[in-house]
Amino acid sequence: MGGIGKTTIAKVVFNELSSHLGKCCSFIENVREIMSTEDGTVQLQKKLLSDIAGSTYAEGVKDSEQGMNMIEATLPERKVLVVLDDVANKDHIKKLIGNKSLQSGSRIIITTRNTAVLQVRGLEGKIIPYEMLEMDDTLAFQLFCRHAFGGDSPSDDYQELSREIVSSTGGLPLAIEVIGSLLYQNNKAVWEETLVKLRNIPEKDIVKKLRISYDDLDENQQEIFLDIACFFCNESKNDAIYMWTDCQFYPKRGIKVLTSKCLIKILDNDKLWMHDQLVDMGREIVRLEGPNDLDERSRLWKSNEALEMIRTEERKGEVQALEISGSDGSIAITNEEFERLPNLRFIQLRDGYFAGDFAKCHSKLRWISWEPVRQDFRAVNFYLDHLVVFKLDRSDFTDDSKAWDLIKGARNLKVLSLTRCDSITTMPDFSKCLGLERLTIAHCSQLERIESFIGDLRSLIKLEINECPRLIDLPEEMGALVKLELLSLSGCSRLRELPGSLGNLTSLIEIDLFDTRIRELPSSIGKLISLHILRVSIPRLYYGETDDFQFPSGISTLANLEELDLSGRIGMKGEIPIGIGELSSLRILNLESTGICRIPRTINRLHHLQTLNLGHCHEIQELPELPTSLTYLCLASKPLISVPNLSNLTNLVDLQLSDGYHFGGRSNPIPGCNLSCIGRLSRLKSLNLANVPAPPELASLSHLEKLVLEHVDFEPLMQLPFSHWGLRNLSTLEFYGFNMEEIALMGLPWLEEFTVQCSSLRRLSISSELKKLRQVSVSDCDELNEIQVLGLPRSLEYPSVGECESRTGISGLSYLKNLQRLEISRYEVLTDVQGLNELVSLKSLEVTGCASLRRLIDASCTKIPDDCKVLIRACGAFVPDSVGMMHLKRYRMVILLNK
């Protein structure tokens, strides 16, 4: 059922888990909708690969089969978190996840209205369904009140009326939000009238209930709503506003109303978002404009319907917007067809072209999104006087193509985007577009030059020239762009300098120079008094490069600067200038992987600084006193000799301290480092210590959720049971390189994940008290000779044991009646896994590289279900290999044949 809250919960879970998996996370929205389009599968495959492996790799996808192969080659190599939202059929899962086994700890979350799609061949037992129930009555009432009254409860005279309205919505969160927002600040008569309408609608017909709110919109707001439902969900709000403004839809007012009524949301990246149930409603409204006549519909978003309509010879005065996709150059939009669309204001054309003489077409087009299929341009006299948004993608038009005449004549143009135009070497001539406010040139692999006329575009607010690897410099005329607020040159990897006129751009708020080879910023940068964000970082892939880089001189005057990111500039040597203390608004300072050797004492003046990243700064020996405003501090340096007293950093939430030697580096902890003060940092939620002296106690860190300890001498504290540590909220615990022989894991009621890599560990016991525990990972424990499982709870989803070399056995598995997946790998001396045959809920078993195993599954008496997927590899003569992944029922035959 739509509107019940599946996507909302998936986003909450995604946000919670993504912090544990770094950048290997992807949230794929609107799978059903996007994959119904012609190139939707490739589009989502690229999105997934871009999120997981980077945009450059993702661009290699040419078709869905290749995309699936690339996904199968990529996902198993990483621990990933992927959400597939609103999946409609099994093929969607196969095309986006593939058929290969994923790495341990990976999670795939799927939301769907149809549980049948979860029965995917090859994934039996690995997809665990969770049915969404209707909202609890109390919570539903509270949600309604928040939208209808702005609080948790109504006044007495609205109490009963509110409960009746909530009941009539069917307990669906979306309907509750929309109806509650509709009634906000309306009188009782409107409430009673709305209740009558709701009661007259069948209980399960959520669309008609939502339609009540749509009908309350004025005509312009309805036009905006339908545009979003048909074309602009997950698209830029700002670009659409230009079109709606030119159409006199008054979008600023309209978007405010739609947002207040919970009909749309504005995401953090300024993209428009609409619930899929509302998208369906909007499209149904358009369909009903002409149930049997496409010419009567205002918007056509299905390519086959749009083509059917456009090929007929009747005049189509109702049609306002079209989306058309073709292939192999088969779609030509002719001048005659255009003449029959006098009110067309939006067209999105993929793999098609315009042809003919358009002199008689008095076009009202405001928006063109175009992916041409041909290199030649076959339209003449195509005048676009009303065009405000032009987006050209994947074009082979050369510098001298007549296609650029489209732009020359578009005097009203506000937004221009040229992406993947790989045949241009210089910027096309759009010098007459003096009203242009947003210009994007991206992924143009042959672009070498930006023309000087760019200085004439004095209305520009946003200039993005990204991922153009041949671009070397920029013209001085850029200094005339006095209204410019954003300058992004990210990914222009040969760009080595900026024009000295940069200082004239006094309206600049953000400069992004990520992945450029700029060695020094012009001294005039100090004039950019409005600047909030300055990024001059390079990707981790190139952290080893040693290009010299000078710390930006003159930036001490940038009193409004909030973020300074110089990470990866390993060639930036020496001391940070004392003038950094003048950056009174600075909140984020990222100097990770730079060559700096000293931080000045003046850093203590930065009273708004929240994030200080000094990870992998291997020239720093000590730190001065730091500002008390810090919430995040990361310091990792090999020559580190002392750490300042941190007791004044009472706002710290995340602390990471390391000598820079991971996994068996320097044997002695940092000498001048006393961490007794850590106990005073009561707000800490995450603590990561590596090769530093152990703090004497942690009991005062009652909010701590994640604790990672690497080569830290915690022996005194380890003598105490975990229940005495006082870490009642701890959910993640990781031990690396400890000199201890036994761990009894108990007394941590909120623990969800436990990882241990300790070569001296001999015995590990895990208690049934750990009701939340869902993941255990044990590896590189060469002396381990016993793992005892003392009745683990139902929550445990994934125990993993690997690379442990001592004589050992695993026992206690018989308690795990709800265990669904078990992996044991590279455990060369493991001889026996006791209790395995009692795992009545097991759905997946993978055992590899356990050469000494003498027995595993007893084919005659095992209680493991027949449909459990089994993979056995390289486990010695007594345990036969499976032939790939197979069901236990079939593997029994392998066992019997082997005897």
Image (tube, rainbow, N blue to C red):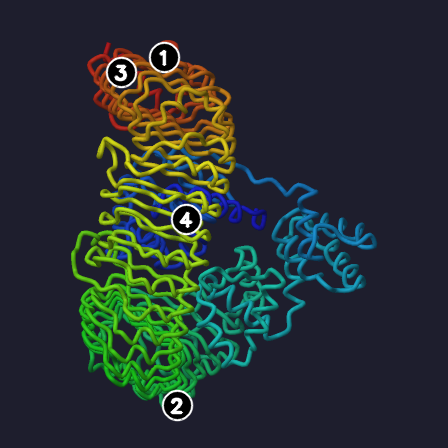
Q: Nearer the viewer, residue 692 or 212?
A: 692
Q: Residue 661: percent from the left, percent from the top?
A: 24, 38
Q: Amino acid at mark 3?
A: Leu
Q: Which residue is mark 2?
A: 360
For the residues bearing labels 3 and 2, Cβ distance under 8 angstroms: no
Q: Residue at x 80, y 50 (%)?
A: 160
Q: Amino acid at mark 4?
A: Tyr
Alpha carbon separation for disc pair 4 and 2: 63 Å
The crowding category of the residue bearing disc 1, from other C-alpha atoms within 10 Å (few below 14, some 14 to 19, many at least 20), is some
Mark seen at residue 830? 3
Q: Residue 246: percent from the left, percent from the top?
A: 49, 81
Q: Which residue is mark 4?
A: 632
Q: Is residue 747 left or right of residue 197?
A: left
Q: Is residue 815 left or right of residue 191?
A: left
Q: Which residue reaches farthest right? A: 157
Alpha carbon separation for disc pair 3 and 1: 11 Å
Q: Which residue is mark 1?
A: 834
For the residues bearing labels 3 and 1, Cβ distance under 8 angstroms: no
